[in-house]
Image (cartoon, coloured by chain):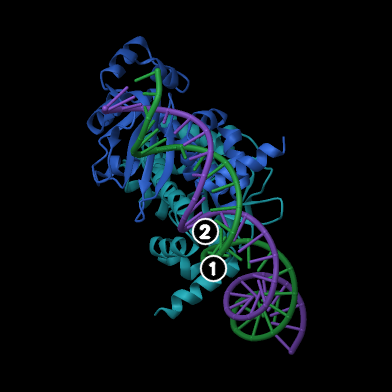
Chain colours: A cyan, B blue, C purple, D green
Amino acid sequence: MFEALLQNIGEKIALTNEETAQLKTYFTPKKLRKRQYLLQEGDVCKNLAFTEAGLLRLYSVDDKGIEHMLQFALPGWWVVDIYSFLTGEPSRFNIDALEDSELLLLSQENFEAMMAALPKMERYFRILFQNNIIAKERRLESAIAFGAEERYRQFEQAYPDFVQRIPLNLIASYLGITPETLSRIRRKLARKN
Amino acid sequence: MFEALLQNIGEKIALTNEETAQLKTYFTPKKLRKRQYLLQEGDVCKNLAFTEAGLLRLYSVDDKGIEHMLQFALPGWWVVDIYSFLTGEPSRFNIDALEDSELLLLSQENFEAMMAALPKMERYFRILFQNNIIAKERRLESAIAFGAEERYRQFEQAYPDFVQRIPLNLIASYLGITPETLSRIRRKLARKN
DNA sequence: CGGGCCTTTGACTGGTTTCAACTTCTGTGG
DNA sequence: CCACAGAAGTTGAAACCAGTCAAAGGCCCG
């Protein structure tokens, strides 16, 4: 149950066996069926969620009912509406499972308690956040600097796994284009080969 | 020289006088003239820079020579190519001054040393990074979910100061649109009032 | 086997870019 | 202090990319 998490942490900081044992006590395992919500718009995001298995997504829904994909979470990824989690404000986002999934939840209280008890984890999360910033910066640059086709190419290259696993319309939403446009881009790129 | 920095840190964590004194020793003051570079594409980003006074920008330049604004830095803001800073890889970005500016530089070595000597600063930077992620998430959602006019409205609302202080063409670049389009948007919005 | 969702395709629309010209503003040297 | 060159902003016309609307085909799951 903790394989992916411990590996992920182990890549960034070193914990003793004792610390590892203590670490586990802060997490709550949770299984999610396909299409089941972890967070719904209007609720407060009370947990950091680590994906042990499966696939989640975080998205918003606009006035017209259109969904906008902000994040996917494969095994080894964290997912959270960090704003709601930190401030306690209701979330504008939804998180649900695209496939049956296994999660490890870390509540706000346990998050704080863990930081106090295991100061090394400050470092772990700082590194996590650093990496997240780098990734978001890339995506942002891509979004403001390039057209649809180029954005899709970069996405393919950055996440070759996703392309197989995630429905076209969700990738389109992630890129900020319509499913129709993405379909046409794929046809065009396929022809070139 | 340290006013803005100490205030910014004080909002997030509490330091004793001793710790404050020690903190200062890790920073190097630097003045930048308008148009002067802090970082040029191809160089390694060796410093975190805190803006005490003035105005900086971080941007990339694409194949066609077009600049893409990724960040502005007013007093109280940090600016860095975090990827280059952390990995030691050459930067794809430029940082330069839009106005005469005063900075406090924190080198990689001093950053690490400071973290070790003042563990509270782990927390400060974690909070900083959290806030940065929230801000980038907002901008990203805006970029993929809305058209040019709506994006500009949100920008105006989020950063009313910037609109006065920053040239139109840089705001356009920040929003991922052309200066012409932004000029027309402004005309249209002005008419409505 | 049937229904619903996802994907594809086509025709049309509309927002943005591109290109070009002109104006306004700013800074710098004669 | 003026003149002028370059940068910044505005405006218009044409081209283009992506979105919208509509319909049909494919595929999975119940």
Q: Are marks 2 and 1 in contact (CB under 8 Å)?
A: yes
Camera sees residue B80: no
State the image coordinates of residue B137 (x, y, percent, origin top left).
52, 44
State the mark number for residue A182. Answer: 1
- Write down the residue under mark 2: A175
Q: Decide if residue B56 is on the left or right side of residue C30.
A: right
Mark 1: which amino acid? Answer: Leu
Q: Quadrant of residue A153?
A: bottom left
Sequence-first tag of 2 and 1: 2
State the image coordinates of residue A50 (x, y, percent, origin top left).
48, 50
Mark 2: which amino acid? Answer: Leu
Instruction: Please rate how many residues cluster around mark 1, counting C-alpha atoms within 10 Å: few if below 14, some from 14 to 19, many from 20.
Output: many
Image mark 2: chain: A
Q: Quadrant of residue A37?
A: bottom right
State the image coordinates of residue A47 (x, y, percent, origin top left).
56, 42
Front residue of this view, candidates B3 and B32:
B32
Front residue of this view, candidates A37 and B166:
B166
